[in-house]
Amino acid sequence: MTLHLTTEDQALLAGDHGEAVSLAMRILVSAAELLSAQALIRVTSAHIDGCLYHGDGGVEFAEKLVAAGGQVAVPTTLNVGALDLLHPDTVRADPLKAAMARRQMDAYVSMGAEPTFTCAPYQIGHEPGLGEQVAWGESNAIAFANSVLGARTERYGDFLDACCALTGRAPLHGLHIEQNRQAKVVVDATNVPDALKDQDVFYPVLGTWLGLEVGREVSVIVGLPSKVTRDQLKALGASAASTGAVALFHVVGVTPEAPSLDAVMSKGGSVRRITLTADMVRRALRRLTTADAVERIDAVAVGSPHFSITEFEALLNLVRGRCMAVPFYACTARATLRELEERGDLLALHEAGIKIVADTCVVVTPILRESGGVLMTNSGKFAHYGPSKTGYEVVYGSLEDCVESAVTGLVARTEEIWSW
Amino acid sequence: MLIPGNAEGGLLRLQAPISLWGGVDPGSGVVIDPRHPDHGASITGTVLAMPGAIGSSSSSAIMLELLREGTAPAAVLMAHSDAILALGVVVSIELGYPACPVLEVELSALDGVPEGALLRITSEGQVLRL
């Protein structure tokens, strides 16, 4: 099984389109070979995860592409960076690191990527269609693009995402190929009470369980309500892509490739069937909280993945006219912030003490107070990465729980819905 | 064999899949995820046997930083090929920094090998016990 390159691929590799494209092709070809891909395919868009600063190597890589004349070949969006460029005081970064973080963000913008700086490009108008081949980074965005939009991407990490953007190509492998998108695991959620399945708070828990259970396998879930919202699916995918390597899940009657169970079930090979029980759900729920016995919280963070306009509407309804006793961070895209501004919703959020974080979020860069403590969140992804990335203990609850807790500073959680 | 190369190191078997981003501190090479069963272990210089790579697509970048900082494993043995992790090594080579071999191996082949046992990875992709 060898990689076949077209004449045009070879010209890109040889440097006919400049040194940056040649470098990107070299890395892309290495990746294709280690993935045993037989060809490269054209992609129609890219989402670059690599603009987030982790160390000087990432800056060096991006600036090397810039110096070599790199420009994106397809419409390209950018993931979060390590700075909030709209509110420069938000991030407590050491000045040297902040300067490097800025250089990394600037490098990708100068290559023609759109400065979206969001982990949820799909909710600000970048929605590839059913069957469209794309190259996306950022684990939640990958899961959403594949599962909810029916676009086709593999899990592209930092660097490879940029190489796909500069060449407009990706290795033909994995979820780019129809037959690999069939489910090998069937999850039956029929037994979960509708009253719980109607709640947003259920979906990060379901995702946490799914990622731990299926790892990298494609799954299909039956028994979810057809009215399940995009925000709920976003939360499901983000959590599953944190505890597992989930890049695609189907939901029968909801996601575009799963009009029926038959349509997405693997035709060859064995299929594993799991019936979701109360015990499985409660175990996943418990895993999301590390600070079980605490009474007080020190901060609340929402918006991982970045808060959508509909999530802000829900937040606004809960906080209007109230005052938060602890710092309450809502992380979002600058495009969503602009929309809030245009709607005239910002004032009420500010008056309630909601701190809006744009272009970044509280787990990827130092924003929370250095003192440490307990962070409450409605995000499965924040609950998963919070302890290691911020040093804070975490308490998981619904958005309503987060607001009620933030108003008093004392943990308030609705427990009854989990008893069945 | 994803990334060929020679290496030697003590075996560290991770007991659960890991996301390098959020899972390992590139400055120290230590597992920092308190929920991970190997929390507190150092992966630096080990032959790291991974049952799976999960989570963040930033893990390529963490692999590059581990290699630049000198805190990387001596070699990585993976149950499933994973482009995210291996890409960090590809880019490290491209930028002139060190590499470490990454091999796709059936981890059951290591059954019976004690934790910390010195292993040699050959450029032909063999895993030898010293």
Image (cartoon, coloured by chain):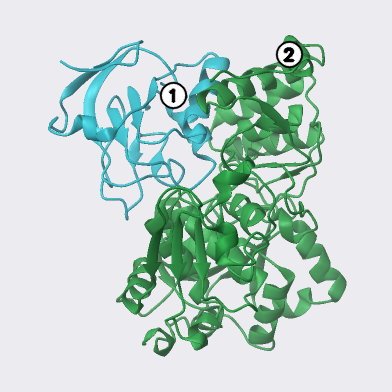
Chain colours: A green, B cyan
**Label 2 to label 1, Cα distance in Å?**
30 Å
The residue type indicated by label 1 comes to: Leu
Q: Position of residue B97 (x, y in %)?
A: 49, 16
Q: Residue at coordinates 56% horizontally, 62% vertically from top-left?
A: A262
Q: Quadrant of residue A349?
A: bottom right
Q: Is residue A39 above or below residue A158?
A: above
Residue A389 appears in the picture as rendered:
yes
The residue type indicated by label 2 comes to: Gln
Q: Position of residue A372 (x, y in %)?
A: 41, 61
For the residue carrying disc 2, how many other residues have a C-alpha within 10 Å: few (<14), some (14-19), or many (20+)?
A: some
Q: Residue furthest front?
A: A268
Q: Quadrant of residue A113?
A: top right
The mark found on residue B67 in the picture is 1
Q: Is residue A377 above or below residue A17?
A: below
Q: Residue at coordinates 51% horizontally, 86% vertically from top-left?
A: A194
Q: SS of the residue at dot 1?
A: helix
Q: Quadrant of residue A328?
A: bottom right
Report the mark closest to the observer, 2 or 1: 2
Quarter of the C terminus of chain A within the rendering: bottom left
Q: Is residue A66 above or below residue A270?
A: above
